């Protein structure tokens, strides 16, 4: 088992003139933007905010690997990634 919280995959779609990204592993975590570049920035902010809340409430789940051109990998800041992994290991009695 390669447990990590280094990144999550977002599902990118186009709705009219807007770009949308949703994170299948994190229901309700989504954002949109006018351009693809803006979308990636907004996605990182939305993901980080959601994971900070998950960490506060100890409700984090490790990411699932997704394949396909419609998915994009959004990296997690290193400190948050380590904190999530540490808390998850404590909660589930997994040694990291």
Image (spheres, rainbow, N blue to C red):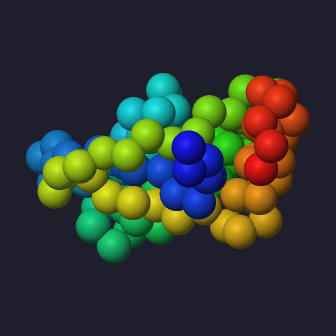
Instruction: State the image coordinates of residue 22 (x, y, percent, origin top left).
Output: 37, 40
Quarter of the image holding residue 62? top right
**Residue 73 figure quarter:** bottom left
Q: Residue at x 27, y 67 (%)?
A: 35
Is 65 left, or right, of 41 in this rendering? left
Q: Say above or below: 14 vs 61.
A: below
Estimate the x, y position of residue 31 in percent, counting from the top left.
43, 46
> In x, y percent, where is residue 17?
16, 54
Asked if residue 12 lies left or right of residue 43, the reply is left
The residue at 39%/33% (across/down) is 24
Q: Residue furthest left?
A: 16
Figure quadrant of the N terminus: top right
Which x, y percent locates residue 69? 16, 57
* 67 over 82 or under it: above or below: above
Q: Give the camera-side residue of 62 and 52.
A: 62
Q: Residue sitting at 77 percent across and 50 percent down? A: 96
């Amino acid at each position: 088992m390669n447990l990590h919280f280094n990144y999550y995959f977002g599902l990118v779609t186009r709705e009219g003139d807007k770009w949308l990204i949703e994170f299948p592993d994190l229901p309700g975590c989504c954002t949109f933007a006018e351009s693809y570049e803006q979308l990636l920035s907004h996605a990182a902010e939305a993901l980080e905010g959601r994971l900070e809340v998950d960490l506060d409430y100890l409700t984090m789940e490790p990411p699932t690997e997704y394949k396909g051109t419609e998915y994009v990998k959004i990296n997690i800041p290193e400190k948050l990634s380590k904190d999530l992994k540490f808390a998850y290991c404590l909660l589930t009695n997994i040694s990291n």
